[in-house]
């Protein structure tokens, strides 16, 4: 064939690829009644057909759906069931068959949705998924929060405005919250946060009808929340029927604002309790000081009086000691003078004695006179000894008193010392050095 000739044909594969590319622009939602279902056990896909309802010569639409999407839909396809399918058309090339590639399926009409809702609710309730015994308490003083909602709209704003300033750390995932496509996004968001280090999962959206809340009545989503590792709080507004995800959650709130208040609760209670305890503590202290002020003053007076008594007694002892020392000094001086006179006296007595002997007087009388003189001297010395012993400071030390000196000078007045000065304190069995810390005047 001449290479220069223009190619006027394409392969079947190329032709069908071009058609499928064009057909992908016809994405839509189609309503119909299920006419046939082929599940193909063990395979990853299924086929079904839908037809127009109540028409004499209805049109048929062949549909293919992956089983993962089918399971997420939460529906069980049955012949005669009216549904809406969402997806894109195309030609299945191995068979050359036109097929509607279905992404989601949903029931038609509020009545059908209500029947499905009640049926699934009864099943899950029978399994115990809504039991109060399975509800977990929200964490005390939560910090790490996983949040799932749409970033658009007022819901997230209301939540953030009402969330207290308690240092919350929020892991946020933006997700659809309405329509059949929202189911898969919500599941993906939950499974992502399941791997995060959070203390509580929060799922919120605004109110709506049973039809608009269809994703939140999905069985797969409900079971995913029931098995979440940390407590889950759901805040979804509703007109009448409570969404199943709210029933299975550990805590259900009517609005996103109520969810924020629930998260604030333990923080606010703790702060309030701290404030009350603080007020109670100050009140008790005030009452204690007020009621015991009189006793405190009395105790102070008693202590002051006792210390004053000690100081007064010490002063008396000090004066007595000083007088004793003066007396001892005077007595010793007197004895000293007497003793100083004794040689002269003895000399005189001896002269008289010698004279008497020389005059041949009685020798016995002379010796007696000499003996009496020495006895007098001995009595004076013994008397001085007793006085010294009686007035000896060592005796006072044995009675519990002490003698305080600094640099060898006896301390008699407060004016002799100052703070930080070292003093020597003598007691009965020894002495020690001490530093002056406090000085109290009379």
Image (cartoon, rainbow, N blue to C red):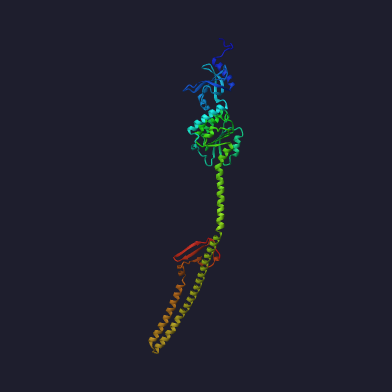
| Residue nearest the viewer, comparing 122 with 214 | 122
Q: Residue placed farthest to the top in the image?
A: 1
Residue 180 visible, this angle: no
Image x and y of residue 169, in percent: 55, 38
Image x and y of residue 130, in percent: 50, 34
Give the mark count.
0
- Where the N terminus falls, by quadrant? top right
Residue 396 visible, this angle: yes
Quarter location, residue 363? bottom left
Question: Vertically, is 327 above or below 405?
Answer: below
Question: Vertically, is 62 above or below 417?
Answer: above
- Where the C terminus falls, by quadrant? bottom right
| Residue nearest the viewer, comparing 25 with 334 | 25
Q: Is residue 374 left or right of residue 148?
A: left
Question: Vertically, is 320 above or below 284?
Answer: below
Q: Residue placed farthest to the right in the image?
A: 154
Question: Vertically, is 126 above or below 429?
Answer: above
Q: Is residue 242 left or right of residue 371?
A: right
Image x and y of residue 159, in percent: 59, 37
What residue is at 41 percent from the left and 86 percent from the top?
353
| Residue nearest the viewer, comparing 390 with 240 | 240
| Residue nearest the viewer, comparing 266 with 350 | 266
Image x and y of residue 97, in percent: 53, 17
What residue is at 54 percent from the left and 15 percent from the top?
12
């Amino acid at each position: 064939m001449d290479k220069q000739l223009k190619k006027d044909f394409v392969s079947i594969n190329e032709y069908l690829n071009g058609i499928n590319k064009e057909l992908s622009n016809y994405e839509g939602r189609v309503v119909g009644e299920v006419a046939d279902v082929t599940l193909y056990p063990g395979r990853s896909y299924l086929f079904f057909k839908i037809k127009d309802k109540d028409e004499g010569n209805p049109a048929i639409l062949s549909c293919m759906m992956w089983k993962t999407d089918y399971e997420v839909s939460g529906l069980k396809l049955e012949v005669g069931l009216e549904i809406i399918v969402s997806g894109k058309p195309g030609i299945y090339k191995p068979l050359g068959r036109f097929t509607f590639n279905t992404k989601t399926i949903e029931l038609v009409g509020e009545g059908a949705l209500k029947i499905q809702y009640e049926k699934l609710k009864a099943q899950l309730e029978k399994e115990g998924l809504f039991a109060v015994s399975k509800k977990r308490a929200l964490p005390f003083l939560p910090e790490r929060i996983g949040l799932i909602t749409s970033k658009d709209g007022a819901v997230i704003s209301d939540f953030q405005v009402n969330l207290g300033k308690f240092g919350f750390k929020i892991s946020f995932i933006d997700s659809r919250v309405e329509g059949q496509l929202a189911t898969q996004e919500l599941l993906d968001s939950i499974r992502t946060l399941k791997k995060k280090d959070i203390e509580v999962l929060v799922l919120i959206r605004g109110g709506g009808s049973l039809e608009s809340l269809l994703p939140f009545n999905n069985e797969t989503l409900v079971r995913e929340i029931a098995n979440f590792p940390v407590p889950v709080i759901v805040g979804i507004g509703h007109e009448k029927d409570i969404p199943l995800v709210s029933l299975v959650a550990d805590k259900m709130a009517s609005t996103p604002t109520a969810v924020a208040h629930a998260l604030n609760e333990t923080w606010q209670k703790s702060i309030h309790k701290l404030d009350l305890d603080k007020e109670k503590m100050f009140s008790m202290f005030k009452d204690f000081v007020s009621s015991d002020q009189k006793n405190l003053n009395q105790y102070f007076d008693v202590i002051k009086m006792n210390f004053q008594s000690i100081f007064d007694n010490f002063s008396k002892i000090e004066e007595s000691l000083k007088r004793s020392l003066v007396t001892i000094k005077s007595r010793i001086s007197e004895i000293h003078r007497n003793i100083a006179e004794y040689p002269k006296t003895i000399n005189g007595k001896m002269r008289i004695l010698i004279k008497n002997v020389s005059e041949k007087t009685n020798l016995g009388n002379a010796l007696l006179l000499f003996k009496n003189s020495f006895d007098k001297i001995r009595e004076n010395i013994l008397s001085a000894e007793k006085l010294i012993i009686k007035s000896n400071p060592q005796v006072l030390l044995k009675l519990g008193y002490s003698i305080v000196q600094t640099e060898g000078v006896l301390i008699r007045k407060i004016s002799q010392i100052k703070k930080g000065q070292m003093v020597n304190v003598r007691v009965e069995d020894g002495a020690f050095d001490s530093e002056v810390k406090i000085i109290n005047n009379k």
